[in-house]
């Protein structure tokens, strides 16, 4: 699976990353931390400059992963009484 080694590194070292880079964006290639950056864009640009066009992981170091919310449409059956 693509980036599995990078995700494993992130999860394995999460407590260390939190202690040093909380709220920053880390750039990881393989099992190596390349750097930490103030924005996702800065980390991505650094990844392209340092690693070229190949898979690498950019991830924000947070205590908890944000939960995405997708709004649901309100669907009313055509024969429902309002």
Image (cartoon, helix red, strand yellow):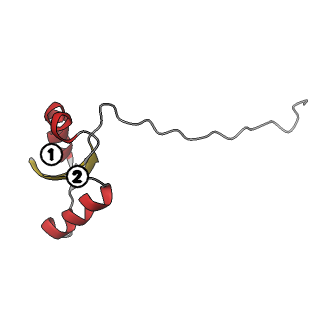
Q: Quadrant of residue 5?
A: top left
51 or 79, which lies in front? 51
Left or right for 66, reference 46: right
What secondary structure is found at the residue carrying circle 2? loop
Q: Residues within 10 Å of mark 1 (few under 14, many from 20)?
A: some
Left or right for 64, reference 10: right
Residue at the spot of label 2: 2
Quadrant of the image for the C terminus? top right
Left or right for 82, reference 37: right
Q: Residue at x 18, y 34 (%)?
A: 14
Residue at the spot of label 1: 5
Taking the view exactly as shown, the residue that stands out farthest to the left is: 32
Q: Quadrant of residue 67?
A: top left
Q: Residue at x 22, y 52 (%)?
A: 2
70 or 35, which lies in front? 35
Q: Which mark is residue 51?
A: none
What secondary structure is found at the residue carrying circle 1? helix
Per the model, the C-alpha gap separating discs 2 and 1 is 8 Å
Q: Position of residue 76 (x, y in %)?
A: 79, 36
Give the total number of marks visible in the rendering.
2
Q: Residue at x 40, y 37 (%)?
A: 66
10 or 39, which lies in front? 39
Q: Position of residue 60 (x, y in %)?
A: 29, 45
């Amino acid at each position: 699976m693509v980036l599995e080694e990078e995700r494993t590194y992130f999860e394995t070292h999460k407590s260390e990353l939190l202690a040093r880079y909380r709220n920053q964006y880390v750039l990881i290639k393989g099992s190596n931390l390349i750097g930490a950056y103030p924005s996702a864009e800065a980390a991505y640009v650094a990844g392209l400059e340092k690693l070229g066009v190949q898979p690498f992981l950019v991830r924000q170091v947070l205590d908890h992963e944000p939960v995405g919310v997708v709004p649901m449409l309100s669907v009313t059956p055509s024969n429902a009484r309002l």
